Image (cartoon, rainbow, N blue to C red):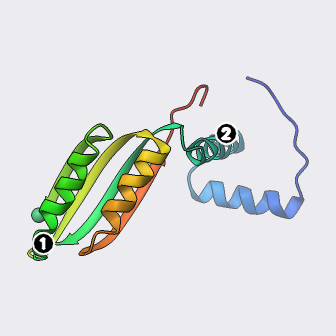
Amino acid sequence: MARVGVAIDEDLLQEFDTSIERRGYANRSEAIRDLIRADLVNEAVQSPASEVVGMITLLYDHHVRSLHEKLTALQHGFHDVIVSTLHVHLDFDNCLEVIVVRGSSSDVQKIADRLISTKGVKHGRLVVTATGRGL
Ligand code: NI
């Protein structure tokens, strides 16, 4: 472990300490390490060729004709990126799908955009992370 000294404005540090305490961080160092990791992951994800893993969530209307078939066909088109799909019959009208993806940042973004923009999908989100080295 390396030790670093950082000059920070008193008010900013006070706000940071309040925030990390509320979130349950044991100490300031752990919170700062997480911030640095988040920044590195964010940077990795910005690069189209980076290998990333992620999760796409889709909430959609079960009654929209052939929507489920469309979403499945799209996923088959990206079978090398799709790791696993969990389908939940949420209630009488709604389905929730959680799709785990792995591949280049650009492929993952592409399949997420295609799925989320499909007519009948009410809400969709892509969350990505990268293991990276030394994180
Ligand atoms: Ni369903």
Element type where label 2 sits in the image: helix
Q: Amino acid at mark 1?
A: His
Q: Amino acid at mark 2?
A: Arg
**33 or 133, nearer to the observer:** 133
**In the figure, residue 98 lies in which quadrant?**
bottom left
Task: Decide if residue 57 is in sight here.
Answer: yes
**59 or 50, nearer to the observer:** 50
> Residues at badges 1 and 2 in contact (C-beta under 8 Å)?
no
Label 2 CB-ligand 1 distance < 8 A: no
Image quadrant, ligand 1: bottom left
Q: Looking at the picture, does residue 66 appear above or below residue 99?
A: below
Q: Position of residue 61 (x, y in %)?
A: 18, 74
Image quadrant holding the C terminus, namely top right
Q: Which residue carries the number 1 mark?
A: 62
**In the figure, residue 19 lies in which quadrant?**
bottom right
Q: Nearer the viewer, mark 1 or mark 2?
A: 1
Q: In the figure, is residue 97 to the left or right of 102?
A: left
Label 1 CB-ligand 1 distance < 8 A: yes
Q: Residues within 10 Å of mark 2 (few under 14, many from 20)?
A: few
Q: Which mark is residue 77?
A: none
Q: Position of residue 65 (x, y in %)?
A: 10, 74
Q: Position of residue 92 (x, y in %)?
A: 8, 75
Identify the mark nearer the N-term, 1 or 2. Answer: 2
The residue located at (73%, 58%) in the rendering is: 16
Q: Which residue carries the number 2 mark?
A: 33
Q: Position of residue 55 (x, y in %)?
A: 36, 50
